[in-house]
Image: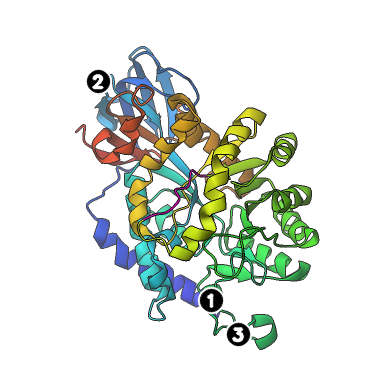
C-alpha cells in the first residue's frame, strides 16, 4: 500500500494538472479518415509513390490505392493532400521524458515533488507529439504514470515504450546519490532517486533479478541496465565496466522469461563484449566501439541504438563536457564502421537535464547526413526504429506494425508540406511543415481544414 496508493494518486494528479493546459489539442475520435491525392513515403522506399488514396478506419490503415474509391461520405473525414507527402510518424528510440524535462538543478532541489516532475514530463510529451514523434522508447526514469494518462487520452503524447527505473550497480551510471546518502544495503534507507522511481541500485544476482522483475511488474516493455561508465554521472569514469557477467545474465534471463529484452548503457568494447556474452539485445551509445566488437554485434544480431552527440550544449556542466571528450572523438569512426559491417542501427536523441534541447529533436536528425542519405535517414527514424521497438514482443504496449504506410499497419501518420526525400530540412521545422499529425488513427493537428 505504501507504494501503490501514491502511484495512483500521482496518476490522477498529473491528469488534473496537465489536461487543462492542452485542452486546445483536441484529437478526433476513431473513425474513417481518407487522405486523398497524397504521395507516400512508405517507411523504406527510396522514392515517393504516385498520387494515392489512403483510408484510415479506427486506428489502422485499411486501404491504399492509386485510384479513387468509394467511402461512406457521412462518416468519413476527407483530407486532400494536394500532392503533399504522407509518411509514418517519427520514432525516437532513446528519450527520457522525465529527465529530459528537468534541469539538474531542479532534480537536485529537495523541494521538487513527484507532481512537479510529472507535470514537466507531461508537457514535454505533448510538445514531442506536436513535433511529429508519435512513438518513443523511454530509456529510464519515472514513466509509468505518465504513460498511463497518455494511453487513456488524458494527456496528448506519443506512444511510450517504458523501461522504468534504470538498474545500476553501486557507483554505476545510475547511482545518483548525493554524498550525504549512504548505501541502502548497509544503512537501510533508499536514496531519493530510488524513491522517485529513477533508478534501482542493485548489486549481486538476487538484487538484479528483483529490480528487473519490479520493472516488469509495473509494465516495462524492456529493461535498461547500466553496463559501463557515463558522462552525466558523478562516480563512474567512462572507461569502467559495470556489472559482472553473472549479474548481467540475471537481468537477461528474467527479461527473456517475460518475452522481452535487455538494453545496456555502454561505450567501451570491454563492456559491450560482456553484454553480448550475457545475451543483451540492444547496446545504447557505443561511441567507443572498435571493429572487432561491432563485428561481434553484427554476427550476434545485436542492435546499436545510438545518437549523434555534440561536444557541448549551452547549459552543460563543465565536468560533463570534459568526460564527453573521448566519446565525441570516437563517434565518427563508430558510425562509419557500423554501416560498413552491417550492424542493425536505431537512432535516438538522449537529451538530458537541458529542457531547451528538446526543441532540437527534429533538427538533430539532420546531423545524420554525414553518414546517410535522406531516404536512409527517414527509414532509420521510422521503419528501422519500429523494428527495434518490436523486440519487446508481447510486452510491447501497442500490438501492430509501426514505421510504415501499408495496409494493416497502425495509423501513425504525418502529412508533410513538400518532399522530405528531396529536402530533408522539412522535418526540422514541424510547426510549419507538418500539416497533419495523426497517432493511433486520431488527428492531433490538422491545418488542412
Q: Is residue 309 magenta?
A: yes
The CA span between labels 2 and 1 is 52 Å
Q: Residues within 10 Å of mark 1 (few under 14, many from 20)?
A: some
Identify the disc placed on residue 92.
none
Q: Position of residue 114 (x, y in %)?
A: 42, 73
Mark 3 neighbour class, 10 Å CA radius: few under 14, some 14 to 19, many 20 or more? few
The Cα atoms of the two marked residues, 3 and 1, are separated by 10 Å
Q: Is residue 322 left or right of residue 344?
A: left
Q: Quadrant of residue 235?
A: bottom right
Task: Report the mark closest to the observer, 2 or 1.
Answer: 1
Q: At x 76% / y 70%, what residue is drawn?
A: 204
Q: Which residues are magenta?
A: 307-313
Q: Name the residue beneath numbered marker 2.
A: 82
Query: Which residue appears farthest toward the bottom when viewing the image?
Result: 187
Q: Position of residue 194 (x, y in %)?
A: 56, 74
Residue indicated by mark 3: 189
Q: Residue at x 25, y 29 (%)?
A: 74
Amino acid at each position: 500500500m505504501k507504494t501503490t496508493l501514491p502511484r495512483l494518486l500521482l496518476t490522477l494528479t498529473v491528469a488534473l494538472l496537465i489536461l487543462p493546459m492542452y485542452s486546445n489539442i483536441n484529437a478526433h475520435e476513431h473513425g474513417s479518415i481518407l487522405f486523398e491525392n497524397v504521395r507516400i513515403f512508405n517507411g523504406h522506399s527510396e522514392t515517393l509513390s504516385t498520387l494515392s488514396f489512403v483510408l484510415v478506419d479506427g486506428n489502422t490503415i485499411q486501404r491504399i490505392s492509386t485510384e479513387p474509391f468509394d467511402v461512406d461520405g457521412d462518416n468519413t473525414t476527407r483530407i486532400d493532400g494536394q500532392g503533399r507527402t504522407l509518411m509514418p510518424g517519427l520514432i525516437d528510440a532513446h528519450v527520457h521524458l522525465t529527465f529530459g524535462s528537468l534541469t539538474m538543478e531542479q532534480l537536485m532541489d529537495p523541494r521538487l515533488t513527484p507532481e512537479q516532475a510529472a507535470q514537466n514530463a507531461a508537457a514535454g510529451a505533448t510538445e514531442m507529439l506536436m513535433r511529429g514523434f508519435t512513438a518513443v522508447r523511454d530509456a529510464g526514469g519515472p514513466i509509468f504514470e505518465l504513460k498511463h494518462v497518455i494511453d487513456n487520452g488524458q494527456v496528448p503524447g506519443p506512444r511510450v515504450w517504458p523501461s522504468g527505473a534504470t538498474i545500476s550497480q553501486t557507483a554505476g551510471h545510475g547511482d545518483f546519490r548525493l554524498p550525504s546518502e549512504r548505501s541502502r544495503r548497509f544503512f537501510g534507507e533508499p536514496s531519493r532517486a530510488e524513491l522517485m522511481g529513477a533508478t534501482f541500485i542493485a548489486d549481486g544476482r538476487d538484487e538484479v533479478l528483483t529490480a528487473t522483475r519490479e520493472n516488469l511488474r509495473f509494465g516495462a516493455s524492456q529493461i535498461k541496465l547500466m553496463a559501463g561508465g557515463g558522462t552525466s554521472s558523478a562516480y563512474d569514469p567512462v572507461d569502467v565496466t559495470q556489472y559482472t557477467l553473472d549479474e548481467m545474465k540475471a537481468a537477461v534471463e528474467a527479461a527473456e522469461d517475460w518475452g522481452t529484452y535487455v538494453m545496456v548503457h555502454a561505450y567501451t568494447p570491454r563492456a559491450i563484449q560482456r553484454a553480448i556474452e550475457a545475451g543483451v539485445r540492444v547496446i545504447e551509445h557505443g561511441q567507443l566501439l572498435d571493429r572487432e566488437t561491432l563485428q561481434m554485434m553484427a554476427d550476434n544480431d545485436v542492435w546499436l541504438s545510438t545518437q549523434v552527440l555534440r561536444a557541448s550544449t549551452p547549459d552543460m556542466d563543465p565536468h560533463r563536457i570534459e568526460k564527453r571528450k573521448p566519446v565525441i572523438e570516437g563517434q565518427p569512426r563508430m558510425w562509419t564502421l557500423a554501416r560498413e559491417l552491417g550492424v542493425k542501427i536505431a537512432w535516438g536523441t538522449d537529451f538530458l537535464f537541458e529542457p531547451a534541447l528538446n526543441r532540437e529533436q527534429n533538427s538533430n536528425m539532420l546531423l545524420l547526413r554525414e553518414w546517410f542519405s535522406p531516404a536512409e535517414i527517414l527509414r532509420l527514424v521510422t521503419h528501422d526504429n519500429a523494428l527495434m521497438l518490436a523486440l519487446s514482443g508481447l510486452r510491447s504496449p501497442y500490438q501492430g506494425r509501426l514505421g510504415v504506410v501499408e495496409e494493416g499497419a497502425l495509423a501513425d501518420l504525418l502529412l508533410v508540406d513538400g518532399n522530405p526525400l528531396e529536402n530533408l530540412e522539412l522535418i526540422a521545422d514541424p510547426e510549419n511543415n507538418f500539416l497533419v499529425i495523426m497517432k493511433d488513427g486520431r488527428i492531433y493537428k490538422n491545418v488542412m481544414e
